[in-house]
Image: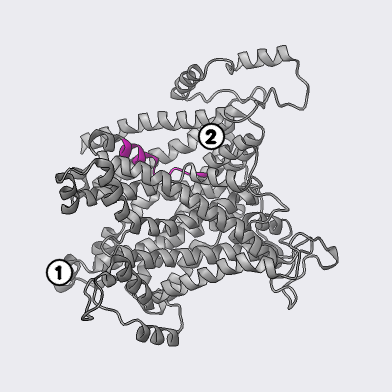
Amino acid sequence: MTRLIIRRVLWTVPVILLVILMTFLLMRQIEGNPFRHSERAIPESIQRNLEAKYGLDDPWYVQYVRYVRDVATFDLGPSLVLRNRDVNDIVREHFPPSLELGALAMLFALVFGIPLGLLAALRANKWPDYSAMVVANVGFAVPSFLVATLLIYFFAVRWGDIFDVPTSGWDTWQSKILPTIALGLGPMAYFARLTRGSVLETLQQDYIRTARAKGLRRRRVVVVHTLRNSLIPVVTAAGPILGFLITGSFVIEQIFAIPGIGRYYVTAVTARDYSVVMGLTVLLAMIVIIANMVVDILYGILDPRTREAR
Amino acid sequence: MSSTPQEHGVGLAPLRQRKERRYPTPPDGVQTDAGAPIRASSLWRDAWYRYIRNRAAVIAGVAFLVLVAYCLIWPIVSPYDPYAVDFSQASDGPSLAHPFGTDQFGRDLFTRTALGGRVSIGIGFAATFVILTIGVTYGAIAGFLGGFVDNGLMRVLDALYGLPYLPFAIIVLAIFGGGNFWTMVVALSIASWFTTARIVRGQIITLKENDYVRAAHAVGARWLRVLGRHLLPNTLGVLVIAVFLELPGVILGEAFLSFIGLGISPPDASWGSMAQDGYRAYRTAPHIIIVPSVAIAYLILCANFIADGLRDALDPRTRET
């Protein structure tokens, strides 16, 4: 087990290097840089000086190695557009709201998705199952911007007098309700479908029949024997879902005017702020890669059968 | 085959009875008719029988075809010019003349939704095709060569699994300087092929152990022939399923990008750009954002049920989510 963990942890290093390289090479294809495509006319010599200052005139592999070295020391470099600001500052300022939003949405999805799926599976092919699955299928298919817009429309415009929920910003707890639901609905539906399928499969296992046969109470069979063994696919899905939450937050942060990383990302790309885009992409990728790593290790702990296979 | 039609809870009862009479289903893989041609029990025919038995999948398939036909045909026969601005009837709700209402420029939404569907579905299929091409190449190389090549390639995939494609899509759009049909296709496929590669590799590895592949090797077939003749054609089933598994993600990706203003931009219509238009006016005319969003949801629902049906039909042994 320890060997598996060490190997899995070590393996993330080349992958992160690869992702940085991918992003790095992609970024270099973008025409122009913030100094050359400026509204203000900057003299040629100053442009060259600025490029030299930020190391943009070095060959790409030199820049790459320097960048990787900086990332390794948690220094994502200076912003190219906002003078006197580091990417680290931007991350520190814009990352917490995004992280909080993602975590809340994930919590929402788990807290409502798993019971919904469990309920559907235990009442398979009866009306609770049908209604749960209609909710899950529709929730999965409806784009989050519609969910967000409808939530705002009903709770702030239509019934605004009754509820009085703020629809922008990220400061009071009231302002966090609608974005959490809008972002979490898709993953909730996904978890519900996943749990349902997995529970149905587990219910057919021999050990469930044994547990019932030896007279355990239904509650215990469901919670201890069924649910615990059914959650493995849910754990596996957590990595990709995290990616989904980050991706989804681009739109949600825009709609609810949340000063998060997704909203800032779009601004940075349009402004050609290389170092910010690089830094944020690498950060997002690292989060997903590390989440995958944690999931893989958890998987090994939860399901001993997978240990030898890997 | 755990997915019985009733499970999904949608559908029309009379339709099912007629279907069952029209398509008597032979047991899997067994041809009961005496004197029937041997080809009658091919994989695809069996799959067709299995698919047709899944009511939700059949309805989803028909609904999907109806949507595609509407997108292709309606802009041609529609009495309205989808680009003509007419402020005298701006932001009207649904009516007889305009079944989906009009947007804030007075353009008929029923026509524009069809037009946007062409773009959205077109981008969806084109990007899915690119994703499958890259995925098949990568997966086939890994699965076919095996050994340390496979190990390396797959570990990379393991780690990239679940990487959000949107940041990379946004960078690609910045490289091309904006979103149009083909730049969107590239943007949406560049970081989305990991799952397909994984599936294809798994399939190739399973197939490699089959006797007919060993036999082909034994009689001296060169590797290219084994790969092109015996391995790749047998992954076709998984790929057909993969088309409908990838489609929802790509369609949503287009919608997200256009919604935040980086994809298809007005006056060109795509479901994402129409939703963006609608978002600007949601307080007074919510139907403008609801129409394209429901179109997206409708398409994704269809694709999900079609994928489920295809999986049961083509690949009954491996049911994983």
Q: Position of residue B107 (x, y in %)?
A: 76, 64
Quarter that holds the C terminus of chain A: top left
Element under label 2?
helix
Read off the residue under disc 1.
A210
Asked whether A129 or A20 is in front, the reply is A20
Badge 2 density bin: few <14, some 14–19, many ≥20, Cα 10 Å: many
According to the picture, the residue beneath numbered tag 2 turns out to be A280
- Inspect the image, locate mark 1, and give the three-letter code of the amino acid beneath it: Thr
Check contact, mark 1 vs mark 2: CB within 8 A. no
Residue A308 vertical position relative to residue A195 in the rendered view, above or below: above
Separation (CA) of disc 1 from disc 2: 52 Å
Mark 1 vs mark 2, foreground winner is 2
Q: Residue at x 71, y 61 (%)?
A: B282
Location of residue B281 (image quadrant): bottom right
Residue A159 visible? The answer is no
Magenta stretch in the rendered image: B153-166
Q: Residue at x 46, y 70 (%)?
A: B61
The location of residue B24, given as percent across then percent down, is 31, 82
For the image shown, how many numbered marks are present on the structure? 2
Of callouts 1 and 2, the N-terminal one: 1
Residue shown at the point (37%, 70%) measured from the top left: A119
Subunit ID for the residue under disc 1: A
From what the image shows, is residue A33 above or below residue A115? above
Q: Is residue A242 above or below residue A208?
A: above
Q: Is residue A271 left or right of residue A291?
A: right
Give the secondary structure at mark 1. Answer: helix
Along the line of sight, the residue nearer the viewer: B98 or A195: B98
Q: Does the stretch in magenta take in B165?
A: yes
Looking at the rendered structure, the kind of residue marked 2 is Leu
Rendering quarter of residue A7: top left
